[in-house]
Image (tube, rainbow, N blue to C red):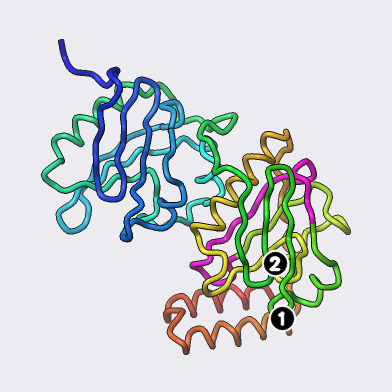
Amino acid sequence: MPHTMSRMGDVLAGFHAAWEFESDSVLIRFERGIRTPKLFQTLGERRVPLEAITGVTLAQGKRGTVVLHAVPRPGADPLMEAAAGQLKESCDPYRLVLPADRETLAEYYADELRARLSGDGEPAERFLVDPPKAPVQFKAYDGKASFDGTSVSFRWFWTGASSAKWKAGDQNFPVTGLGGVEWRSPEVFEGHLRLLRRDPAGGAQPAQPDQDPAAVVFGLGYGPVHESLPFAASVLAAVRAAGSGPVAVPVARRDPADIAERIRHLGELHQAGLVTDEEFSMKKTELLAEL
C-alpha cells in the first residue's frame, strides 16, 4: 500500500521552519533562532487548511537549496491580504527553503499536496487561515497603535505627529466602523498603516497619511514588518468578521509645497545611502506626477 500523508506526523524540516502534513491541513512551525526572520518568529506557528492553498511549486533556490512553495488562495489568509504582495521572498511564510539533497523528498511531498488540492483558484469568500491574535500593538514614527480585538487606538507622539493629528487628538476606531486596512511596507518610502473608514469625515479619505488621523506613519526603526503587518492582518480579520465590506480609497491631488518638501526629504535619504539611485528616480517621478 503506497505511503500517503493521511497519517499525521509527517514532517519536512527546512531552514527556519518545519511543515507537518496532516489530512486536511499543513501545520507550519517557525524556528525562533537568531537567523530566523523576525516575522516568522512573531508568527510562531500557523495551521493552513488545504482549501486555503491553490497550488504547489518546487524550484531551485540560492546557494544549493530548493524551495517548496505553497501558493495561497486569494482571500484565504488575512496576513497575505494585508501584505498585498509587498513581502520579500525571504519573509514569505509559504516558502520552505531546504538543502538541495532533500529535493527528492520535497518533490514527493509537493506531489502529495497537489493530489489533495481541490480548489480551482477562485478567491475565498472568507478567511481560512487564523490571523495573529489580539491584543497587539506597535510603535510607529508618529504614534502608538493598539488593537484589543474590537477597536484600534492611536496615541500620538509629540516628537513625530503632525499638527493635524495633534488637533484631532488621540483616536479610537471600533472595527464595526471600518471597511479595511491599507498597509504599506516600512521597507519602502512612505510606509504607513491606514484604517479605511466606512464614513470618513468630510466624505473623503485624506491622501497623505501624515495628515490623516486614521493613519500612522512608519520610519527608520518604526513600524517594522514583524510588528505592523501582523497588526494589520489582525485588524483586517476583525473587520471582515464584523461583516463590513471593503471601501475604496479616493486619491486627492497634493499641495505643490508638500510635493517639494517630500522630494527634499527623498533627496536626503538618497544622499544618506538609504535609497538607491533607481528608487530615488522612480519615486521622484511618481511625486512629480501628482502635481
Side (left or right) of 146 relative to 66: right
The numbered mark at residue 32 is: none
Q: Tell which circle, 1 or 2, labels the residue nearer the N-terminal end.
A: 2
Which residue corresponds to the image point at 62% horizontal and 40% vertical from the top-left?
237
Q: Residue 67: x, y in percent? A: 25, 46
Which residue corresponds to the image point at 86% horizontal and 57% vertical from the top-left?
201
Which residue corresponds to the image point at 14% horizontal and 41% vertical from the top-left?
102
Which residue is identified by label 1?
A: 258
- Count of labels in the image: 2
View extreme (right): residue: 202
User: In front: mark 1 or mark 2?
Assistant: 2
Residue 36 painted magenta: no
Amino acid type, label 1: Asp
For residue 205, which quarter of the picture?
A: bottom right
Q: Element under label 2?
A: helix
Q: Residue 223: x, y in percent? A: 57, 64
Between 197 and 149, the residue placed more toward the observer is 149
Between 226 and 201, the residue placed more toward the observer is 226
Question: How would you rate the neighbour count of disc 2 (Cα within 10 Å): few for under 14, some for 14-19, many for 20 or more?
Answer: some
Which residue is identified by label 2?
A: 209
For residue 159, which quarter of the picture?
A: bottom right
View extreme (left): residue: 101
Which residue corresponds to the image point at 59% horizontal and 30% vertical from the top-left?
126
Q: Magenta part of the protein: which range?
A: 172-191
Amino acid type, label 2: Pro
Q: Residue 43: x, y in percent? A: 46, 47
Question: How would you rate the neighbour count of disc 1 (Cα within 10 Å): few for under 14, some for 14-19, many for 20 or more?
Answer: few
Task: Assign the N terminus to one quadrant of the image.
Answer: top left
Side (left or right) of 164 relative to 190: right
**207 relative to 282, above or below:** above
Between 264 and 153, the residue placed more toward the observer is 153
Task: Assign the C terminus to one quadrant of the image.
Answer: bottom right
